[in-house]
Amino acid sequence: MRLFEGTEFDRPLRCDKCEELEEECTCPPEKPVLTPPAKQIARVGVEKRKRGKLMTVIRDLVDEHDHLPELLTILKNHCGAGGSLKEGIVEIQGDQRERVREKLKSLGYRIKG
């Protein structure tokens, strides 16, 4: 006798919509629902790092379905600077507050700070 024999965990998985086995299901994949930029408030600030380097930091953005790497690429291209993404915080090299605010507003985000 297997550990989960006869329970719901022993049965093969089925689609919630068509009740077919997941391997045989032909339902189209669901599109992810993202929080629109107009409902997000981006906090833009500058932090001083080692050796006096400045970093523009964008906080409090919702990290859903990996849209932050796309936003990071857009901001880096707009500012002409490097940047990174750490724990849901977008970082752009240098003091780029005005450029970042301008681009975020054009994308529909609300800005604070």
Image (tube, rainbow, N blue to C red):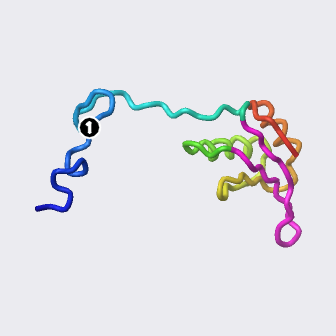
Residue placed at 70% from the left, 33% from the top? 37
Q: Is residue 75 above or below residue 24?
A: below
Residue placed at 78% from the left, 30% from the top? 106
State the residue in front, 37 or 5: 5
Q: How many marks?
A: 1
Q: Residue 48: name its quadrant.
A: bottom right
Residue 57 lies in magenta, yes or no?
yes
Residue under numbered circle 1: 14
Residue 46 picture location, percent across and down: 86, 55
State the residue in front, 77 or 28: 28
Q: Residue 49: name its quadrant.
A: bottom right
Residue placed at 85% from the left, 42% from the top? 112
Residue placed at 32% from the left, 33% from the top? 16
Amino acid carrying label 1: it is: Arg
Q: Residue 26: name its quadrant.
A: top left
Main secondary-structure element of the magenta-colored stretch:
strand
Give the magenta part as a residue range: 40-61
Q: Is residue 24 left or right of residue 44?
A: left
List the single residue furthest toward the front. 7
Residue 38 picture location, percent across and down: 73, 30
Q: Is residue 14 above or below residue 6?
A: above
Q: Secondary structure at mark 1?
A: loop
Residue 99 picture location, percent across and down: 85, 41
Residue 102 lies in magenta, yes or no?
no
- Quadrant assignment for the N terminus: bottom left
Q: Is residue 23 above or below residue 59?
A: above
State the residue in front, 37 or 75: 37
